Amino acid sequence: MKSVIKVFNMKNTTDISRVRNAISNNEGIIACQINSEKGEVSVVYDDYFVSLEQIMESIENLGYTIL
């Protein structure tokens, strides 16, 4: 599966790094690309292991807002 998640308050490279680490800690993540200018996270994952809701929850647990 491929999804694009809009994340509101990613401002700098530290934010990008934190979001990338949170996503990659989920089992089943194949690829993750972050566009900070658009505030978008493109993630490719195996939905057998992880759901989109779990991925979004891992980002929200860091204090970021998903639109």
Image (cartoon, helix red, strand yellow):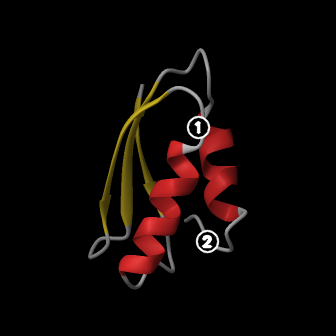
Question: What secondary structure is marked by label 2?
Answer: loop
The residue singled out by tag 1 in the image is 52
Q: Is residue 43 above or below residue 44?
A: below
- Taking 59 as reference, is 1 left or right? left
- Tell me which amino acid carries mark 1: Leu
- Taking 11 as reference, is 36 left or right? left
Residue pictured at 70% horizontal, 52% vertical? 57
The residue singled out by tag 2 in the image is 65
Q: Nearer the viewer, residue 34 or 65?
A: 34
Q: Is residue 46 above or below residue 44?
A: above
Residue pictured at 45% horizontal, 56% vertical? 20
Chain-order first, disc 1 or disc 2: 1
What percent of the width, then of the height, locates residue 5?
Answer: 46, 53
Residue pictured at 36% horizontal, 78% vertical? 13
- Taking 50 as reference, is 38 left or right? left
Q: Identify the image quadrant of residue 41.
A: bottom left
Q: Is residue 31 above or below residue 48?
A: below
Mark 1: few/some/many CA within 10 Å (<14, 14-19, 20+): some
Q: Is residue 20 above or below residue 25?
A: below
Quadrant of the snapshot with the C terminus: bottom right
Question: What secondary structure is marked by label 1?
Answer: helix
Q: Identify the image quadrant of residue 61.
A: bottom right
Q: Residue furthest bottom?
A: 11
Q: Which mark is residue 9?
A: none
Could you give the CA–CA distance between mark 1 and mark 2, rounded to whole angstroms?
Answer: 15 Å
